[in-house]
Image (cartoon, rainbow, N blue to C red):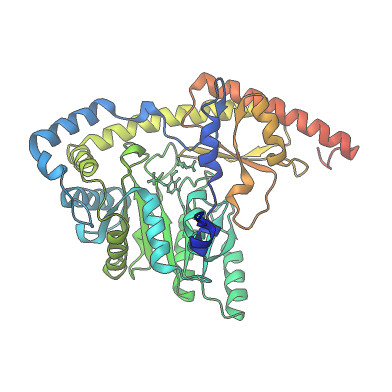
Amino acid sequence: MVVNIDRLSSKRTTRFKASEIRELLKITQIPEMISFAGGLPNPLAFPVDIIHECIEKTFQKNITHALQYGTTEGLAPLRSALAERMKKKKNIHCELHDIVITSGAQQALSLIALCFLDPGDTYLTTVPAYLGAIQAFHAFEAKCESIPMDDQGIDTDSLRRNLERLRRTGIYPKFIYTVPTFQNPSGITMSQSHRKELLQIASEYDFLIVEDDPYSELIFKGDFIPPIKSYDTKGRVIYVSTFSKILAPGFRLGWLVASREILDKIVQAKQASDLCTNVFAQYIASEYINGGYLDMHVEKIKKLYKRKRDVMLEAIKKYFPPEVTWTIPEGGMFIWVTLPKSIDTRLMFPKAIAKKVAYVVGEVFFPEGGNYNSMRLNFSYPEDKIISEGIRRLGEVIHDELETSYQQNAFPPEGV
Ligand code: PMP
Ligand code: G9A
């Protein structure tokens, strides 16, 4: 008998969707393609020599432990070091017991979904939203309500209006997902006042805040704004971060800070998922952070990425038509570009690929669709000279597309 996988699979799998970004990673393999698509750290930002040293120290001091299973919560010296760092750098007062080490921030998001979302539940996310989070939450058959971002990081009026509308129909969202600092994909940072207001609203309407913070260490300019978690005295915020952008994503190491009550659930869910996070990698990360290398190395990454951001912004100014607008991120890895409404960046995409330049179509970051005229550009990965050339090519594609749209509409939009 033929195996009928469709009949045998869970209904849930019919909701799984391949990440367009992961699919795009294949395009980056095409020779001469300039990709601004993948949100990849630059390989120059991997502290290769330091990692080598940390591996040697692990071999000398802890190799049998490093090769053994570990606790689900994670390696104690690593969690202590993280607790210390979060106190010092982020004003988050937590102890080792408030932290669980996860297989990347991505697993933390997935475990949160597993613990808090039943089929049919509603969660909120600021939009545009990190695609991997949408993917993780979507798999748990929950309903998403989008809350628009503004230049303050979240439109709190819209949040309140949406919460009232939902409440009238008996819907009480479980949590809001947000990346408040140097957001992926927009590069926008939520203001301090909006962080506090969001926490206040979450308390009034009784939902959790999932604060995803992979980028806040990569600050180029401006004042550091403490995470929402730093204002949380009631255990309402689940804070997630990662070593992917400050060490190397290949280690698959992230962490989650939450109240004990929440952590108990997360730990049980993690036991069922993978027993424990890669122990060898945790020992290396522990040597890295406890050896005092992290601060020094983060400074190097910041310099590298700031330079790349500047090169990209300079090229955008030079090559993009005046009708185009873009964000100026003060850290992180992404610039968000908005084109005139007459341009659909998905339809334009094959033309960009033909010119050997790739971006991520903005629409994929909107779980409820819409926003056809935007795109995400990553500046951390490509080489400087490649950045200028890629933006030049993209500028040509946009110019051509605008020209065609003006011809089709016979006249340019007002004010242009
Ligand atoms: N959250 C955000 C906002 C991200 O940008 C990423 C990675 N690009 C992740 C989570 C996942 O990170 P990790 O490699 O730690 O799983
Ligand atoms: O999926 C990955 O490889 C991580 C990158 C995420 C992104 O581009 O947002």
Residue depicted at 24% across the width and 49% down the height: 82
275 vs 383, left or right, is left
Which residue is nearer to you in this view: 61 or 99?
A: 61
The number of discs equals 0
**Residue closest to the far left:** 61
Q: Position of residue 27 (x, y in %)?
A: 55, 31
Which residue is nearer to you in this view: 366 or 13?
A: 13
Which residue is nearer to you in this view: 356 or 261?
A: 356
Q: Position of residue 153 (x, y in %)?
A: 53, 53
Residue depicted at 55% across the width and 58% down the height: 14
**Viewport quadrant of the C terminus:** top right
In this view, 175 is above or below 287: below
Q: Position of residue 249 (x, y in %)?
A: 36, 39
**Residue closest to the far front:** 1
256 vs 155, left or right, is left
Residue depicted at 59% across the width and 74% down the height: 166
In this view, 120 is above or below 79: below
78 vs 338, left or right, is left
Q: Position of residue 162 (x, y in %)?
A: 60, 69
Which residue is nearer to you in this view: 391 or 110?
A: 110
93 vs 175, left or right, is left
**Quarter location, residue 346:** top right
Q: Is residue 320 at least partly visible in the picture?
A: no
Residue depicted at 42% across the width and 34% down the height: 41
Q: Is residue 359 at least partly visible in the picture?
A: yes
**Residue closest to the far right:** 410
